[in-house]
Image: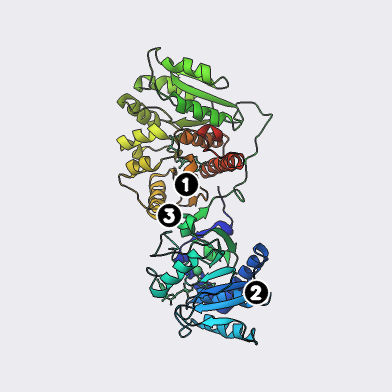
């Protein structure tokens, strides 16, 4: 199981608002109190992270997002950090808690040092300021940005000072991660009560800057509807290798991979899995390719099947392959470099029809699944599917353009077919049989070179062979790549090779 801490739950705007309302109406913590905690907590984070600030421009709408910004202003002026407040929709019609906080703020400023502007036109751009607070719109955004909000966003994005977004960068759709006309490009987003799903989809990652989760007193019981989580190393702990046990007790993996011209995929996957400290890795291969593997994979036990003239898998190999895979308890990786010949497609489907092993289905084995609907009826499916965008479109029989759509489709697909799916791309999405989804949070574009998929499949199947759950195996494999990527980028300027991730 993968149990994310609440700091890594990802909410939609509707879920956030529901939790807010229930906390206020059913639990009895007033909205004003929540706003105070939100603003106080963001102000302390800002003081910690940016200790040298002297003057902020506060861009405010009229909803509660602006109220949070006004609370921040109240705390920061106590630290001699000046404030200029710009109300983009004027000062009439502020939400009740925001209005109350505006009145409070003025009481903290008896000398009228705070500058207040009641429209965008009234604000002419200050001579000196060193940060901007974006308190224009939060979860209340309901359409493309209107009127002066567009102008203010454009202006803020052109300034060379840090921009701090309150709860959400204004203009970013909290669920979809899409830009609603225009969007703030924040250096830092302070988000309240829960991260928003859109931070990690589509345009989100390019606009939130660093995200800091600020806790609000929302009871955890109100958060159980959440089924989307952020994967990161702060909570997905690294596996411990169980040294000293017999090699066949510390993880056995059978890799069924490779065909003429595609032996590299099998080699990469096998090396990648072996590097995780398994007891034994068996590479099942068509006999005609054995010499390639003897040469390249000294640590891997080769299990050739068929005749000397065979260079791809076919149905004729099934009895031998089944027997080999049945010898010891272990996991199976099926797919890298298998090729797409018809006899290989039949081999894959027939093999899966009577396979009770935990199995990672990758690359050409996914091609085979997409050629035949038969697999949908198979009873035993302890499977992890690892489609890249093209493979996913074939499996779903539809094009998937938007991340939000991909998240929902992959979630439904996994639940409907009772499999775990790792949908590759940016973000990587892991969806489980019970409808939970886990998103990555780093630049996966570095992995878009032929071979990194084979390395990833090797890692996932290694963890599966070590008896970790399917979702943990996927998350840990993704994070393993991230760690290696960051280590590589620390000392290198050129692009990493897939072999750097082994
Ligand atoms: N008790 C609460 O409700 C809490 C709310 N919090 C804050 O409140 C925010 C949500 O507050 P609200 O629901 O008041 O919503 P917002 O503050 O996001 O703004 C809603 C207002 O903006 C207008 N608006 C919506 N879309 C617009 C567009 N495209 N262009 C121009 N104007 C637009 C709406 O007409 C409405 O008046 C959260 O994001 C968070 O910052 C926090 O203070 C925590 C507690
Ligand atoms: N550690 C990782 N974290 C996130 N995504 C990864 C990682 N490793 C691989 N990927 C994903 O896998 C993709 C490569 O897989 P794929 O297209 O199947 O390549 P291959 O040519 O190796 O089969 C990358 O574009 C990326 O989306
Ligand atoms: K905002």
How dense is the environment of label 1, judged by Cα within 10 Å: few (below 14), some, or many (20 and up)? many
Relative image position of residue 273 (x, y in whole percent):
55, 31
Q: Secondary structure at mark 1?
A: loop
Spatial CA span between label 3 and label 2: 35 Å
Residue sitting at x 30%, y 46%: 398
Question: Which of label 3 and label 2 is nearer to you?
Answer: 2
* Residue labelled with disc 3: 202
Hey, which residue is sitting farthest front in the picture? 127
Pointer 3 or 2: first along the chain:
2
Spatial CA span between label 1 and label 2: 41 Å
* Residue labelled with disc 1: 428
* Residue labelled with disc 2: 81
Pointer 1 or 3: first along the chain:
3
Relative image position of residue 439 (x, y in whole percent):
49, 51
Figure coloring: rainbow
Relative image position of residue 466 (x, y in whole percent):
58, 35
Q: Secondary structure at mark 2?
A: loop
């Amino acid at each position: 199981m993968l149990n994310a801490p609440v700091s890594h739950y990802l909410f939609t705007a509707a879920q956030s608002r529901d939790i807010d309302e229930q906390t206020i109406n059913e639990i009895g913590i007033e909205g004003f109190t929540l706003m105070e905690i939100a603003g106080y907590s963001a102000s302390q984070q800002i003081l910690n992270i940016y200790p040298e600030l002297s003057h902020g421009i506060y861009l405010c709408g009229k909803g509660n997002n602006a109220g949070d910004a006004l609370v921040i202003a109240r705390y920061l002026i106590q630290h001699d950090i000046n404030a200029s407040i710009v109300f983009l929709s004027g000062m009439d019609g502020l939400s009740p808690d925001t209005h109350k906080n505006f009145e409070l703020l003025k009481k903290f400023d008896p000398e009228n040092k705070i500058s207040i502007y009641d429209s965008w036109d009234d604000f002419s751009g200050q001579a000196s300021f060193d940060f901007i607070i974006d308190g224009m719109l939060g979860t209340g955004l309901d359409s493309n940005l209107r009127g002066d909000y567009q102008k203010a966003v454009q202006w803020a994005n052109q300034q060379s000072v840090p921009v701090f977004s309150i709860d959400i960068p204004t203009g970013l759709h909290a669920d979809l991660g899409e830009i609603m006309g225009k969007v703030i490009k924040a250096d830092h987003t302070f988000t309240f009560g829960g991260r928003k799903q859109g931070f990690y989809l589509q345009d989100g990652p390019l606009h939130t800057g660093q995200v800091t989760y600020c806790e609000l007193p929302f009871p955890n019981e109100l958060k159980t509807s959440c089924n989307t989580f952020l994967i990161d190393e702060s909570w997905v702990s690294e596996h411990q290798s169980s040294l000293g046990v017999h090699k066949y007790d510390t993880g056995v993996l059978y890799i069924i991979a490779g065909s003429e011209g595609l032996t590299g995929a099998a080699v990469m996957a096998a090396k990648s899995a072996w590097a995780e400290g398994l007891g034994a890795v068996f590479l099942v291969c068509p006999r005609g390719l054995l010499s390639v593997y003897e040469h390249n994979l000294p640590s891997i036990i080769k299990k050739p099947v068929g005749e000397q003239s065979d260079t791809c898998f076919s149905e004729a190999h099934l009895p031998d392959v089944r027997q080999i895979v049945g010898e010891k308890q272990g996991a199976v990786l099926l797919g890298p470099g298998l090729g797409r010949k018809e006899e290989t497609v039949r081999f894959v489907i027939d093999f899966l029809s009577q396979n009770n092993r935990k199995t990672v289905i990758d690359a050409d084995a996914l091609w085979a699944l997409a050629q035949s609907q038969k697999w949908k009826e198979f009873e035993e499916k302890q499977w992890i599917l690892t489609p890249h965008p093209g493979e996913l479109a074939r499996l779903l029989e539809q094009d998937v353009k938007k991340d939000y759509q991909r998240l929902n489709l992959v979630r439904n697909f996994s639940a409907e077919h009772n499999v775990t799916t790792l949908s590759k791309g940016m973000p990587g999405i892991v969806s489980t049989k019970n409808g939970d989804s886990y998103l990555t949070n780093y630049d996966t574009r570095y992995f878009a070179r032929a071979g990194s998929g084979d390395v990833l499949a090797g890692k996932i199947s290694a963890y599966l062979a070590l008896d970790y759950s399917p979702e943990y195996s996927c998350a840990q494999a993704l994070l393993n790549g991230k760690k290696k990527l960051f280590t590589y980028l620390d000392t290198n300027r050129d692009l990493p090779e897939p072999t750097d991730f082994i």
